[in-house]
Amino acid sequence: MPVWRAVVHPGGSTVNRHLCFSLLILTGLVPGSRSGDAPPALRVERGQGGKIVQVVGLDAANLKALRAVKWDAELWAALLAVYLDPQDAAATDDRPAMLGSYAVRGDVLRFEPRFPFAAGSRYRVVFNPAHLPHPPAVKQSPIVFRFADARVQKTPTVVRQIYPTPDRLPENQFRFYIQFSAPMTHGGVYKHLKLLDAAGKEVAWPFLELDEELWNPDGTRFTLFFDPGRVKRGLKPREEAGPILVEGKKYTLVVDKAWRDADDFPLKETFRKTFTVGPPDETCPDPKKWKLEVPAGGSRKALTVQLEKPLDHGLLQRLLWVEDAKGRRLEGTISVTGGETRWHFTPKEAWRAGTYALKADTRLEDVAGNSIAKPFEVDVLRPVPRKVEQEAVAIPFKVEEQ
């Protein structure tokens, strides 16, 4: 009697590196499994990194017919069904088939479960060719195989920090950065985010929900904006729905633990950032008010800049830098502390005695969206207090020999 194997074609995603699938259809070796008389080209396998089950090798006539059918869940399950498999293979199991969606993509019939396959659980898949729109002329037994989603749980992913970090934010707070300990799944992220008032009531529609989500390259930091139409005064959304934050009140930004990381595991726990609201901040950051703590020559100690107020954590990573006397940008590492009021630059090589310049791009903003060049909130009834024309401002400093 022939032996058929259920084959897995792993892709290159992060998920696949953590998946180990046991998919066997072995007559007499896996209890209850039968290979039937299916032709060698017809097989059942996992796809999309183990997230779906698919049937490969169907003929063109059946593929065309399956694209057009309007079957209910019961008819689909008669053709292709996935069940939770009891640990005791000899046990009688009358569990219903898993719910999910069926679709033909290219030359493959796919089943995607409504809820992801659970790590450590066993499943049984039954594909019955007799229920195809054009069943084989020669009766074939159902193809049955079992698999265990044997992913090993890694260190759970957590929210490391939400920026800005202070527990008091201006009424016109504009942007948050959510920093995770590992890459996260993308798409549909806003369902995992809520803003609650002091009574625990959800604030309606506070976020700017972008179709193209804003992630850093490695998928560990998500940028979340409040709806600017409800932050900026004089705009219709604010007039109709009111401001998102109100001075003197308390709010909590909630990141739901159901948000799954790139390995398809949920977060370890729900993360909450609670903060009170102060008056709106309408002043531009002023580099003239910054204070520099300059290290001695010959050392690799950090240059520290004391800012006059909290600035945007993400922009501080790329819009503030150090140049030498010849205008060459120094290599080194940047860190931000003190509630985003202290910026530290540690050079790759030891400081040499001489003159340097701290350069700030005029697009650098505070947490309310006011940049060095202009305030976020421009009142048409009064002039902008000051206007910065250059693209970057320079603060010279000198490193002395130790």
Image (tube, rainbow, N blue to C red):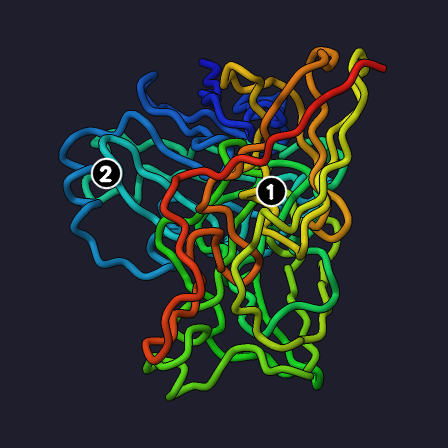
Residue closest to the far bottom: 240
Task: Residue 135: give its label.
Answer: 2
Q: Position of residue 284 (x, y in %)?
A: 52, 59
| Labels 1 and 2: the sequence-earlier one | 2
Q: Position of residue 261 (x, y in %)?
A: 60, 42
Residue 344: quadrant of the picture: top right
Residue type pointed to by label 1: Asp
Q: Does 254 sit above or below residue 293?
A: below
The residue drawn where x is 20% and y is 37% is 63
Q: Is residue 104 left or right of residue 48?
A: left
In this view, the mark in front (1 or 2): 1
Relative placement, left or right, of 399 versus 392 is: right
Query: Few, some or many C-alpha atoms within 10 Å of disc 2 (few <14, some 14-19, many ≥20)?
Result: few
Q: Residue 55: which quarter of the image?
A: top left
Residue shown at 63%/56% (left/top)?
258
Q: Nearer the viewer, residue 8 or 354?
A: 354
Tell me the amino acid under the disc marked 2.
Answer: Pro
The answer to whether 27 appears left or right of 137 in the picture is right
Q: Could you tell me residue 320's position as x and y percent?
A: 56, 36
Give the labeled residue for mark 1.
Answer: 261
| x and y percentages locating residue 132 in the rendered image | 26, 42
Camera-side residue of 309 and 235: 309
